[in-house]
Image (cartoon, rainbow, N blue to C red):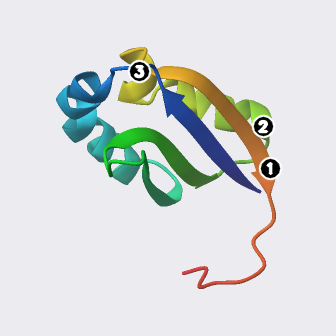
């Protein structure tokens, strides 16, 4: 199954995001992540994350995202993980 993680950063957390970005990108590359990128605010600054992953169930997706360096750094003000059905786009 596919799952989308959507996390909004805490206010004024850009420096924390930048400090943990390298570890986060390495974590993305080492896990069953299919698509990922930062959310941007009105100034074009990173302010959150959107990640699509593959997992057997919601519990497994939650365990996966709990190990994200951004989560460990307590970067997010809010998070949501929801199942997702891939319909259009390249699934390679």
Cα–Cα span, label 2 and label 3: 21 Å
Say above or below: 72 vs 60.
above
Q: Is residue 81 left or right of residue 44?
A: right
Q: Earlier in the sequence, mark 2 or mark 1?
A: 2
Say above or below: 75 vs 37.
above
Tag 2 secondary structure: helix
- Residue found at x 32% / y 38%: 24
Tag 1 secondary structure: strand
Residue farthest to the front? 42
The picture places residue 51, in percent across and down from the top left corner, at 54, 50
Tag 3 secondary structure: loop
Number of residues whose C-alpha sits closer than 10 Å to that of mark 2, classed few (under 14), some (14–19) or many (20 or more): some
Q: Is residue 50 left or right of residue 44?
A: right
- Residue found at x 46% / y 56%: 36
Taking depth in this image into account, of 35 and 49 the one nearest to the observer is 49
Q: Earlier in the sequence, mark 2 or mark 3?
A: 2
Q: Which residue is mark 1?
A: 83
| Disc sitting over residue 75 in the figure | 3
Q: Which residue is mark 2?
A: 58
Q: Is disc 2 in contact with disc 1, using a CB cutoff of under 8 Å?
A: yes
Taking depth in this image into account, of 75 and 46 the one nearest to the observer is 46
The picture places residue 50, in percent across and down from the top left corner, at 53, 49
- Residue found at x 61% / y 79%: 91
- Residue found at x 33% / y 20%: 12
Cα–Cα span, label 2 and label 1: 7 Å
Task: State which quadrant residue 59 falls in.
Answer: top right
The picture places residue 14, in percent across and down from the top left corner, at 28, 29
Residue mark closest to the camera, 2 vs 3: 3
Number of residues whose C-alpha sits closer than 10 Å to that of mark 3, classed few (under 14), some (14–19) or many (20 or more): many
Q: Which quarter of the rendering shows the N terminus?
A: bottom right
Say above or below: 37 vs 45.
below
């Amino acid at each position: 199954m596919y799952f989308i993680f959507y996390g909004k950063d805490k206010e004024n957390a850009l420096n924390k995001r930048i400090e943990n970005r390298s570890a986060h990108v390495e974590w993305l590359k080492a896990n069953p992540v299919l698509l990922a990128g930062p959310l941007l605010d009105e100034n074009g600054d990173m302010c959150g994350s959107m990640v699509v992953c593959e997992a057997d169930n919601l519990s497994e997706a939650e365990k996966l995202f709990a190990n994200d360096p951004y989560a460990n750094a307590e970067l997010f003000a809010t998070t949501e993980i929801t199942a997702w059905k891939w319909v259009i786009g390249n699934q390679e």
